[in-house]
Protein backbone atom coordinates (compact mmCIF):
# COMPACT_ATOMS: atom_id res chain seq x y z
CA UNK A 1 0.00 0.00 0.00
CA UNK A 2 1.60 3.30 -1.05
CA UNK A 3 2.58 5.83 1.69
CA UNK A 4 0.32 8.76 2.21
CA UNK A 5 1.65 12.30 1.84
CA UNK A 6 1.71 12.76 5.61
CA UNK A 7 3.74 9.62 6.05
CA UNK A 8 6.14 10.77 3.33
CA UNK A 9 6.61 14.05 5.15
CA UNK A 10 7.36 12.28 8.44
CA UNK A 11 9.85 10.02 6.71
CA UNK A 12 11.59 13.00 5.09
CA UNK A 13 11.91 14.80 8.44
CA UNK A 14 13.25 11.65 10.07
CA UNK A 15 15.83 11.21 7.30
CA UNK A 16 17.00 14.81 7.61
CA UNK A 17 17.28 14.40 11.37
CA UNK A 18 19.36 11.27 10.95
CA UNK A 19 21.58 12.99 8.41
CA UNK A 20 22.18 15.92 10.75
CA UNK A 21 22.95 13.52 13.61
CA UNK A 22 25.43 11.62 11.45
CA UNK A 23 27.09 14.85 10.33
CA UNK A 24 27.35 15.99 13.96
CA UNK A 25 28.92 12.67 14.93
CA UNK A 26 31.42 12.93 12.06
CA UNK A 27 32.34 16.51 13.06
CA UNK A 28 32.75 15.45 16.68
CA UNK A 29 34.89 12.48 15.65
CA UNK A 30 37.03 14.74 13.45
CA UNK A 31 37.45 17.23 16.30
CA UNK A 32 38.45 14.45 18.71
CA UNK A 33 40.94 13.09 16.17
CA UNK A 34 42.39 16.57 15.67
CA UNK A 35 42.73 17.04 19.44
CA UNK A 36 44.47 13.68 19.81
CA UNK A 37 46.84 14.50 16.97
CA UNK A 38 47.63 17.90 18.52
CA UNK A 39 48.28 16.29 21.91
CA UNK A 40 50.53 13.65 20.33
CA UNK A 41 52.46 16.39 18.51
CA UNK A 42 52.91 18.34 21.76
CA UNK A 43 54.16 15.20 23.50
CA UNK A 44 56.66 14.55 20.68
CA UNK A 45 57.88 18.14 20.84
CA UNK A 46 58.22 17.92 24.60
CA UNK A 47 60.27 14.71 24.34
CA UNK A 48 62.43 16.23 21.60
CA UNK A 49 63.01 19.35 23.72
CA UNK A 50 63.92 17.22 26.74
CA UNK A 51 66.36 15.12 24.74
CA UNK A 52 67.92 18.26 23.26
CA UNK A 53 68.37 19.68 26.76
CA UNK A 54 70.04 16.48 27.94
CA UNK A 55 72.34 16.57 24.91
CA UNK A 56 73.34 20.18 25.63
CA UNK A 57 74.10 19.36 29.28
CA UNK A 58 76.19 16.36 28.21
CA UNK A 59 78.20 18.52 25.79
CA UNK A 60 78.81 21.16 28.46
CA UNK A 61 79.96 18.53 30.95
CA UNK A 62 82.36 17.08 28.37
CA UNK A 63 83.78 20.55 27.64
CA UNK A 64 84.30 21.33 31.32
CA UNK A 65 85.98 17.97 31.97
CA UNK A 66 88.28 18.43 28.95
CA UNK A 67 89.25 21.95 30.03
CA UNK A 68 89.92 20.72 33.55
CA UNK A 69 92.18 17.93 32.29
CA UNK A 70 94.07 20.32 30.03
CA UNK A 71 94.57 22.75 32.92
CA UNK A 72 95.92 19.95 35.10
CA UNK A 73 98.23 18.88 32.30
CA UNK A 74 99.53 22.42 31.89
CA UNK A 75 100.28 22.67 35.59
CA UNK A 76 102.05 19.30 35.56
CA UNK A 77 104.26 20.32 32.66
CA UNK A 78 105.98 23.30 34.33
CA UNK A 79 109.79 23.12 34.61
CA UNK A 80 112.57 25.07 36.31
CA UNK A 81 115.54 26.33 34.29
CA UNK A 82 118.99 26.36 35.83
CA UNK A 83 120.06 29.68 37.31
CA UNK A 84 123.48 31.28 36.83
CA UNK A 85 125.84 28.88 38.58
CA UNK A 86 124.83 25.70 40.43
CA UNK A 87 121.28 25.66 41.80
CA UNK A 88 121.30 22.24 43.53
CA UNK A 89 118.25 21.08 41.53
CA UNK A 90 117.61 17.36 41.13
CA UNK A 91 119.02 15.80 37.93
CA UNK A 92 116.44 15.20 35.19
CA UNK A 93 115.86 11.94 33.34
CA UNK A 94 115.15 13.16 29.80
CA UNK A 95 117.83 13.65 27.14
CA UNK A 96 118.25 17.39 26.45
CA UNK A 97 118.83 18.84 22.98
CA UNK A 98 122.41 19.41 21.86
CA UNK A 99 123.66 22.95 22.64
CA UNK A 100 124.61 25.46 19.96
CA UNK A 101 128.40 25.43 19.85
CA UNK A 102 130.71 28.32 18.91
CA UNK A 103 132.37 28.22 15.49
CA UNK A 104 135.30 25.83 15.39
CA UNK A 105 134.48 24.29 18.79
CA UNK A 106 135.35 20.70 19.64
CA UNK A 107 132.27 18.50 18.90
CA UNK A 108 132.76 16.93 22.34
CA UNK A 109 131.12 20.06 23.80
CA UNK A 110 127.87 18.81 22.30
CA UNK A 111 127.67 15.94 24.80
CA UNK A 112 127.28 15.95 28.57
CA UNK A 113 130.57 15.05 30.25
CA UNK A 114 131.00 12.32 32.85
CA UNK A 115 132.37 13.78 36.07
CA UNK A 116 134.16 11.60 38.63
CA UNK A 117 134.89 12.21 42.31
CA UNK A 118 138.07 13.96 43.39
CA UNK A 119 140.98 12.50 45.32
CA UNK A 120 142.59 13.63 48.55
CA UNK A 121 141.90 16.77 50.53
CA UNK A 122 141.01 19.88 48.56
CA UNK A 123 142.48 23.05 50.09
CA UNK A 124 142.47 25.54 47.19
CA UNK A 125 140.86 26.29 43.83
CA UNK A 126 142.16 24.01 41.08
CA UNK A 127 141.37 24.81 37.43
CA UNK A 128 142.07 21.93 35.01
CA UNK A 129 141.63 22.52 31.24
CA UNK A 130 139.95 19.54 29.58
CA UNK A 131 139.36 21.04 26.12
CA UNK A 132 141.18 24.16 24.93
CA UNK A 133 138.90 26.57 23.08
CA UNK A 134 140.06 28.75 20.20
CA UNK A 135 137.85 31.75 21.00
CA UNK A 136 138.68 34.94 22.91
CA UNK A 137 139.51 34.84 26.62
CA UNK A 138 136.70 35.61 29.07
CA UNK A 139 137.05 39.03 30.73
CA UNK A 140 135.75 40.19 34.09
CA UNK A 141 132.32 41.80 33.75
CA UNK A 142 131.37 39.94 30.57
CA UNK A 143 128.22 37.87 30.33
CA UNK A 144 129.14 34.29 29.55
CA UNK A 145 127.01 31.34 28.46
CA UNK A 146 127.91 27.93 29.87
CA UNK A 147 126.87 24.34 30.21
CA UNK A 148 127.95 22.71 33.46
CA UNK A 149 127.79 19.63 35.65
CA UNK A 150 128.23 19.89 39.43
CA UNK A 151 129.12 16.95 41.70
CA UNK A 152 130.25 16.47 45.28
CA UNK A 153 134.05 16.32 45.29
CA UNK A 154 134.24 13.41 47.73
CA UNK A 155 131.82 10.93 46.12
CA UNK A 156 131.12 12.28 42.61
CA UNK A 157 127.35 12.40 43.18
CA UNK A 158 125.70 14.89 40.82
CA UNK A 159 123.62 17.63 42.45
CA UNK A 160 123.05 20.04 39.56
CA UNK A 161 123.47 20.28 35.79
CA UNK A 162 122.34 22.66 33.07
CA UNK A 163 122.25 19.66 30.72
CA UNK A 164 119.20 18.29 32.49
CA UNK A 165 117.01 21.24 31.51
CA UNK A 166 118.58 21.67 28.08
CA UNK A 167 119.11 25.38 28.83
CA UNK A 168 122.68 26.74 29.13
CA UNK A 169 123.23 29.22 31.97
CA UNK A 170 124.14 32.86 31.22
CA UNK A 171 125.51 35.25 33.87
CA UNK A 172 128.00 38.04 34.44
CA UNK A 173 131.39 36.72 35.53
CA UNK A 174 133.78 38.18 38.07
CA UNK A 175 131.19 40.52 39.64
CA UNK A 176 129.68 38.38 42.40
CA UNK A 177 126.67 36.95 40.56
CA UNK A 178 127.95 33.40 41.03
CA UNK A 179 129.94 31.55 43.69
CA UNK A 180 133.54 32.79 44.23
CA UNK A 181 135.13 29.70 42.71
CA UNK A 182 133.38 30.40 39.41
CA UNK A 183 134.27 34.11 39.45
CA UNK A 184 137.92 33.25 40.05
CA UNK A 185 138.19 30.13 37.91
CA UNK A 186 136.43 31.20 34.69
CA UNK A 187 137.98 34.63 34.05
CA UNK A 188 140.71 34.11 31.43
CA UNK A 189 139.26 30.86 30.04
CA UNK A 190 138.87 30.95 26.25
CA UNK A 191 135.49 30.54 24.57
CA UNK A 192 135.02 26.97 23.35
CA UNK A 193 136.86 25.51 26.34
CA UNK A 194 135.81 22.82 28.79
CA UNK A 195 137.40 23.21 32.23
CA UNK A 196 137.19 21.35 35.51
CA UNK A 197 136.83 23.51 38.62
CA UNK A 198 137.62 21.96 42.01
CA UNK A 199 136.31 24.27 44.72
CA UNK A 200 136.99 24.07 48.46
CA UNK A 201 133.90 24.71 50.59
CA UNK A 202 134.79 28.37 51.25
CA UNK A 203 134.76 29.13 47.51
CA UNK A 204 131.44 27.28 46.98
CA UNK A 205 128.53 27.20 49.45
CA UNK A 206 130.43 26.53 52.66
CA UNK A 207 129.85 23.55 54.92
CA UNK A 208 126.24 24.42 55.81
CA UNK A 209 123.69 22.40 53.86
CA UNK A 210 120.74 24.53 55.05
CA UNK A 211 118.11 25.16 52.38
CA UNK A 212 119.24 22.19 50.32
CA UNK A 213 122.53 23.80 49.27
CA UNK A 214 125.39 21.43 48.39
CA UNK A 215 127.84 21.63 51.29
CA UNK A 216 131.56 20.91 51.34
CA UNK A 217 134.06 20.83 48.47
CA UNK A 218 132.57 20.60 44.97
CA UNK A 219 133.70 19.75 41.46
CA UNK A 220 132.30 21.35 38.30
CA UNK A 221 132.96 20.67 34.65
CA UNK A 222 132.08 23.87 32.74
CA UNK A 223 131.82 24.44 28.97
CA UNK A 224 132.25 28.10 27.96
CA UNK A 225 130.03 28.59 24.91
CA UNK A 226 130.01 32.38 24.51
CA UNK A 227 131.21 35.63 26.12
CA UNK A 228 129.92 39.15 25.46
Image (cartoon, helix red, strand yellow):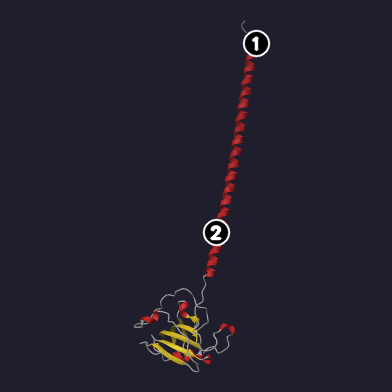
Mark identifier at residue 142: none
Of the two numbered discs 2 and 1 in the rendering, the one whose residue sits closer to the viewer: 2
Regarding residue 196, the answer to whether it shows in the image is yes
Q: Is residue 93 above or below residue 39?
A: below
Is the Cβ of the residue at disc 2 closer than 8 Å to that at disc 1?
no
| Left or right of 51, for residue 106 | left
In this view, the residue farthest toward the bottom is 123
Q: Nearer the viewer, residue 37 or 4?
A: 37
Q: Which residue is mark 1?
A: 7
Q: Residue at x 56, y 60 (%)?
A: 65
State the image coordinates of residue 178 (x, y, percent, origin top left). 50, 87
Picture quadrant of residue 11: top right
Residue at the spot of label 2:
63
| Image position, residue 147 (x, y; %) | 44, 82
The residues bearing labels 2 and 1 have C-alpha atoms spaced at a distance of: 84 Å
Secondary structure of the residue carrying numbered label 2:
helix
Quarter holding the N terminus? Answer: top right
Amino acid sequence: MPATPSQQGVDAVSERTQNRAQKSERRLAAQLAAQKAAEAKRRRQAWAGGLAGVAVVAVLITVFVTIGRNSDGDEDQTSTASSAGPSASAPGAQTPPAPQLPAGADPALGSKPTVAAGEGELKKLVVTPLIKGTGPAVKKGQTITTNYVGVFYKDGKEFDSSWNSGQPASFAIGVGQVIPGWDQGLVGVTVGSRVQLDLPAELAYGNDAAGGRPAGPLRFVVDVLAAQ
